Amino acid sequence: MDLGLRNATAVVVGGSRGMGLAASRCLAEDGARVALVGRTQASLDSAVADLTDRGSPDAVGFAVDVGDAAAVDNLFAEISGRWNGELNVLVNTVGPGASGSFEDLTDEQWREAVEDGVLGMVRCVRSALPLLRKAQWARVVNFSAHSTQRQSVMLPAYTAAKSMLTSASKNLSLLLAKDEILVNVVSPGSIASESLVGWADSVGVDGSDPYRLMEAIDKHFGHPAHMPRAGLPEEIGPVVAFLASRRNSYMTGANINVDGGSDFI
């Protein structure tokens, strides 16, 4: 299916690794011009080379800490100059990583969860809005998590931050509807990301085996799915690419679960 992304401009925050990279690859394969934002230049350089090979013209990487508001403003000023002041797609994948029980998490860990999980997205959207509004069409896709609908006692700060992001995204979809800018949320379930695989290895489980990984997730976090295995990052990418594309012409304010099946309200 042609998603209508050829020569579209797209920024993927957290796009050099894991699910962000999977989404970036799908955008690149459809011909989008992709800018990656991350913290590590080496990872960005490797990902940019990969996207170029997959057909993305003008792929580029920016090493930026989205916790720095001035740096984010400078980033989008540079992107504006590079792409004639227009941006079609903004994808925000960065999220908080702290885990622990409610009574064990410190104030600083709670602050970090909100900083990493919400405010980075807010800064990026705020700085990108003039570019999105100038484009002929525009989409925003933010990453939440299915734990906002299926609680885990080991993820209270993470889940609270993701819930805040989901709510803020819904509000943003309402604000931007008059501009016909579509805003949606993707909520991945138990996906074999680099961090989750590393965690499994640390508790003596072969994280590279998605079936064993799901067993460990069920045991430690109580997050099983109808499917007997964990998902893969490349199973998230096509969902993001559709939501970010011109093919998605009327879906906005939605929260799309990609979680292998779960019971939730």
Image (cartoon, rainbow, N blue to C red):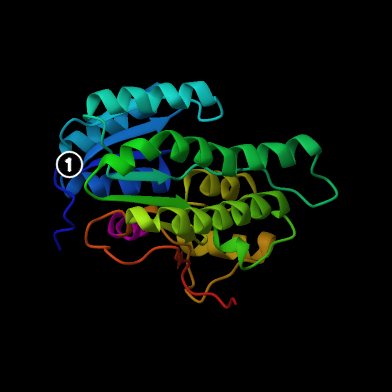
Corner quadrant of residue 180: bottom left
Query: What residue sits 46% from the left and 27% below the top?
Result: 72
Q: Secondary structure at mark 1?
A: loop
Q: In the image, which residues are magenta?
A: 234-242
Instruction: Examine the rendered structure and indicate whether residue 21 appears above or below residue 150.
Output: above
Task: Where is residue 227? Give x, y as percent.
Answer: 47, 74
Residue 165: in sight, yes or no?
A: yes
Instruction: Examine the rendered structure and indicate whether residue 226 appears above or below residue 23.
Output: below
> Which residue sits furthest front?
178
Left or right: residue 129 versus residue 56 is right
**Magenta stretch: dominant secondary structure:** helix
Instruction: Examine the rendered structure and indicate whether residue 49 appears above or below residue 178.
Output: above
Q: Nearer the viewer, residue 43 or 253?
A: 253
Task: Where is residue 7? Give x, y as percent.
Answer: 15, 42
Task: Where is residue 69? Give x, y as percent.
Answer: 53, 26
Query: What residue sits 15% from the left and 45% below the top?
Result: 31
Query: What residue sits 34% from the left and 60% below the top?
Result: 239
Corner quadrant of residue 234: bottom left
Task: Where is residue 96? Give x, y as percent.
Answer: 60, 43
Left or right: residue 107 versus residue 93 is right
What amino acid type is highlighted by mark number 1?
Answer: Arg
Residue annotated with mark 1 = 54
Where's the C terminus, which quadrant?
bottom right
